[in-house]
Amino acid sequence: MTFCKEMENQPITRMLRWFQKDPSDNFVGEAELKNVSLTTLQTLFKLESDNPMYDCFPVDEVSREFVENHTGIQIRLSMFDYFVEADADTPEQQKEAEQVGAGDAEEAV
């Protein structure tokens, strides 16, 4: 089974990760993209609708404002390299999300 097929049935979290510009390329931080559909990201990055976006996609001036609005992170392209990436949620993360969701439902009652 290929990696893509394995991820196909997993919940995916879209992440923004950023790194120091050359020469170090050190990891600096990450933030979750919230309330963004795969279709919207495919359009933003000019991808075919069958592309599951499991790769890393560099944020540029065209995508900067959109990504800022969905992460709350100020993007400084002159200082850092930014990438939109996909993380498959682990079973522990899935369980935690379900518990949080159940707690939210209880609070709403």
Image (cartoon, grey):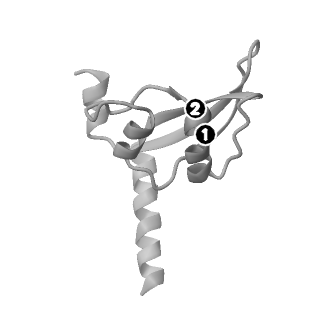
Q: Which residue is mark 2?
A: 59
**Left or right of 50 in this view: 64:** right
Residue type at tag 2: Val
* Residue for point 24% across, 28% down: 5
* Residue for point 65% across, 52% down: 72
Q: Which residue is mark 1?
A: 64
At which x and y percent is residue 53? 38, 32
Look at the image and tell me in which quarter the C terminus lies.
Answer: bottom left
Please tell me which residue lies in front, 19 or 2.
Answer: 19
| Nearer-N-terminus badge (2/1) | 2
Q: Which corner quadrant of the image does residue 10 belong to?
A: top left
Look at the image and tell me in which quarter the N terminus lies.
Answer: top left
* Residue for point 39% across, 45% down: 40
At which x and y percent is residue 11? 35, 45
Q: Which of the numbered marks, if any, corresponds to residue 36?
A: none
Please tell me which residue lies in front, 65 or 96.
Answer: 65
At which x and y percent is residue 16? 57, 38
Residue type at tag 1: Arg
Dot 2 alpha-carbon crowd within 10 angstroms: few under 14, some 14 to 19, many 20 or more = many
Q: Secondary structure at mark 1?
A: helix
